[in-house]
Amino acid sequence: MAADGEDEDEAARAFEDLRGEVTLLRRAVERLTAERAGDTGAPDYSETLGVIAANITATAQRVDALGESPALVLTPHELNRQIVEVGIAGRSEDRRAIAAARQVIEDVAAKLGRQLNSHVVAEDQRRRLRQVGLTAIAAGVVAGMVLWAVLAGPIARLMPASWLLPERMAARSLRMPMWEGGQRLMQAGDAQAFAGVLAGNRLAVANRETLAVCRKQATRAKKAVRCAIEVSAGERDGR
């Protein structure tokens, strides 16, 4: 504290000395101006001296203002204290700015987190809906197949006979034309009877001309007639 008082006294004395020197200089110029005004034979420096006097006066005023400046009145200790306070205030502003920025970052992170969670939930819901939809489609297909297998026969029989819907369905199920599909069904239903059908067909084909003559005779006689046909040895067992 004593050192601060001594520094303040030295600064005040320095300004007082400077103020005194400026005052003396201004008075000397004024006196010189007055003496020159009384001596008519000497050159006229009134204008020059007036300018010098005005400059000295302005300098004195600036010195007075500088001496009264609050910054110069402060002691080194006080000046150091104010510098520290300004630094603390600046750091406080920085801390507030950092805290505000951190809060903004936390808010943005929270918002992004909520959006991400909502996106994940929405994606999970869409995935479940797709699974449910696929399951429903599969169940519908299976149910349709079962219903078709159960109801296809009754529905086909209800249709007009000329549509041949049951026969067509059977041939399509066997992936064969209707003629071949019919043979397959007869053979599967009764193999021996189907063999007899084939044997009779072969006899009719082999004796086509003889049978045609017999039909004409029966038509003219209007009664049954006897006809002689040829039978091969393999026809005895119906093969």
Image: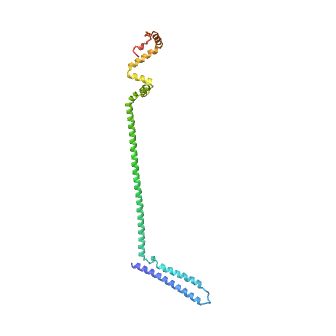
Q: Residue at x 59, y 85 (%)?
A: 46
Q: Which residue lies at the image location 52% right of the left edge and 80% below the top edge?
A: 59
Q: Quadrant of the N terminus?
A: bottom left
Q: Residue at x 40, y 41 (%)?
A: 133
Q: Nearer the viewer, residue 3 or 32?
A: 32
Q: Residue at x 45, y 15 (%)?
A: 204
Residue 2: x and y, percent? 39, 79
- Residue 175 in which image quadrant: top left
Against 9, residue 187 (above or below) is above
For residue 39, above or below residue 6: below
The quadrant where residue 188 appears: top left
**Whole-percent x, y for residue 137 in the image:** 40, 38
In the image, is residue 38 above or below residue 158?
Answer: below
What colour-coding does the image apply?
Answer: rainbow
Residue 26 at what x, y percent from top left? 53, 85
What is the count of numbered marks?
Answer: 0
- 146, 223: nearer the viewer: 223
Q: Work out which quarter of the rendered image holds the C terminus and state it.
A: top left
